[in-house]
Amino acid sequence: MLQYIGKRLLQLIPVLLGMTFIVFMIIRAIPGNPAQVILGQQASPEAVASLEAKLGLDQPWYTQYFDFLAGILTGDLGESLRTRTPVAQEIWPYLAATIELAVFAMIIAVIVGVNAGIISAWFQNSWFDYAAMVVALIGVSMPIFWLGLMEQWIFGIELNMLPTTGREEVRNPVTAITGLYVIDTIIQGRFDQLGEVVRHLILPGIALATIPMAIIARMTRSSMLEVMRSDFVRTARSKGQRMSLVVYKHALKNAIIPVLTVIGLQMGILLGGAILTETIFGWPGIGRYIYDAIGFRDYPVIQSGILVVAFIFVMINLLVDILYSVVDPRIKYD
Amino acid sequence: MSEAVTQPVPGAPEEKAAGPWREAWTGFRKSKAALFGAAIVLMFVVLAFVGPLIAPEGINEQDMSKRLMAPSAEHWFGTDDFGRDILSRVIHGARISLWVGFFSVIGSVIVGSLLGIIAGYYGRWVDTIISRLFDIMLAFPSILLAIAIVSVLGPSLQNALIAIAVINVPNFGRLIRSKVLSIKQDEYITAAKAIGMKDSRILFSHILPNSMAPVIVQGTLAVATAILEAAALGFLGLGAQAPAPEWGKMLSDARNYLRDAPWTMIFPGLAIMLTVLGFNLMGDGLRDALDPKMKS
């Protein structure tokens, strides 16, 4: 097991190096003179030269790349051109906001998706099964940004039930400790704020959860259907065991592996979807951080933001791979 | 491509001539969902071709006196903030979305197939390099990579198309590579090699046509994703630019009028969802018909 993890970590090195190279190329691939493009056509030659020096663009490319790598390894992600603050220093609150939203969405997606899949398989060809699968099909075809706008219109504007922007009540701001507001408010015992924070999470959370929820439901259903036909399920039932026990205890345990794969994959997709969701709901997360940076041509932020998200994505995939072997000891890795 | 597959095998009994494509069509026809999907796709394809003829108004015909009018007999989908007819713009939008969907996928298929075939057929270090490249590209959440590419090339519909084509290359590359690896072992390839056939001929007249079924399935589903991605880039302001009636861009313009004119947001979104749903249903049906092993 440890050997397997070690091997996977080693295999990761070329991928990580390749990732850093692609991200490194983002500024360098800008057609024309990157510094001039960033500053605009009116910029003076002195300003352009000074930005070139600051970004290291006046060096040969391999020197630039090694400096870039050395920077990453020492935790230096460059400096935002807009705020003039080191990216490594200002990125955490955004990242924390995204993590909180993604985890919340994943919890909704897993709870609803897995249960809908189980019930669909349990009562195969019932009206619930049909309805759930039609909803799931629509769910995977739904543009997340459209769903977000529909939610804002229905729940925010027409029904006036839930807040549609931000992650906290502006007049009653949360004091950040970890940056994860649900945890911060609990630590501080501010349960009034906790309620507000959760209310702000609901709409973006549901928008972000929809696609993974649909995919998880479909996967759980097909995986459960397969297991429910197997001999041990028939044996358990013929012994007179309660159906709910058979389904949730025996069958689910054996059907969960492909579902776990999908959940792992979806976690990465959530990170991508977060960019769209955050833009719609004014959620101050990493997606919005990158999006705003694009508007200001703040390339160091674009680079580092993308690198950080991709790094998390790779790590989650690794973690999922490792989890399989824990869940299913039959899986042997050579 | 189809020529190589449908050619009867010399010496094969004539009565078995129902080729794999006919068989697939029979299978596809049986699925109501797949036919429904195909019908939706067909409808949007027709709209894309004849749209300008049947749309009630031009895409940029402004009439400020008819600003933000609710759906009515005159304007079925209402009007937007410039008094433009939303139905007409949604119809024209089909052309843009399908164009991006089809051509980006064709681009990914061509480049992906080429790389996949080279990697799978030649193996060794060529395979290692190409496969690592795919791994690296897949290490990014796809929309993020698309954003990175557009942020370099500059926002436009054409650059969005390029970005979407690039991010989908590894999916096709991997698919073809694995297919080539399994076909390579087949006897008829060994036979072709034995009679001294050139590598390029083996690759393009034997291996490529025989790896096409999963590519068609994946391609259909990829058009759905590509349309969503193009709309997402348009929504973020990184794809089609005003005044193009691109669905994603229309949604992003509609954001300011959610309270007063929700129809400006409802119909373009519905169009995206229906198109994507159509391609998804059709892709699922094709998968079941063409590749029974992939059935879930």
Image (tube, coloured by chain):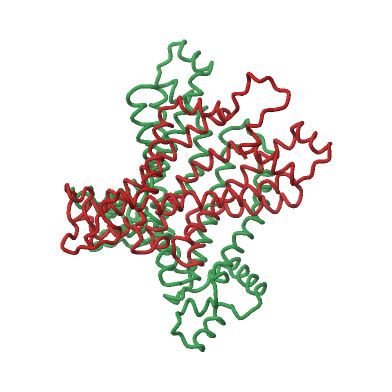
Compared with residue A238, is residue A20 higher up or lower down, i.e. above or below? Answer: below
Between B222 and A186, the residue placed more toward the observer is: B222
**Chain B palette colour:** red
Residue at point 58% right, 54% down? Answer: B137
Between B252 and A154, the residue placed more toward the observer is: B252
**Chain A palette colour:** green
Can I make out residue A315 in this image? no
Residue at point 36% right, 33% down? Answer: A134
Residue B186 rendering spot, x and y as whole percentages: 74, 32
Between B107 and B172, the residue placed more toward the observer is: B107
Residue at point 47% right, 59% down? Answer: B160
Is residue B183 found left or right of A323 in the rendered image? Answer: right
Q: How many marks?
A: 0
Can I make out residue B293 in this image? yes
Is residue A258 found left or right of A145 in the rendered image? Answer: right
Is residue B95 found left or right of B129 in the rendered image? Answer: left
Q: Quadrant of residue B213?
A: top right
Residue A131 rendering spot, x and y as whole percentages: 33, 30
Residue B162 rendering spot, x and y as whole percentages: 52, 58
Quadrant of the rendering where the N terminus of chain A is positioned: top right
Residue B37 rendering spot, x and y as whole percentages: 41, 36
Compared with residue B106, is residue B284 higher up or lower down, i.e. above or below? Answer: above
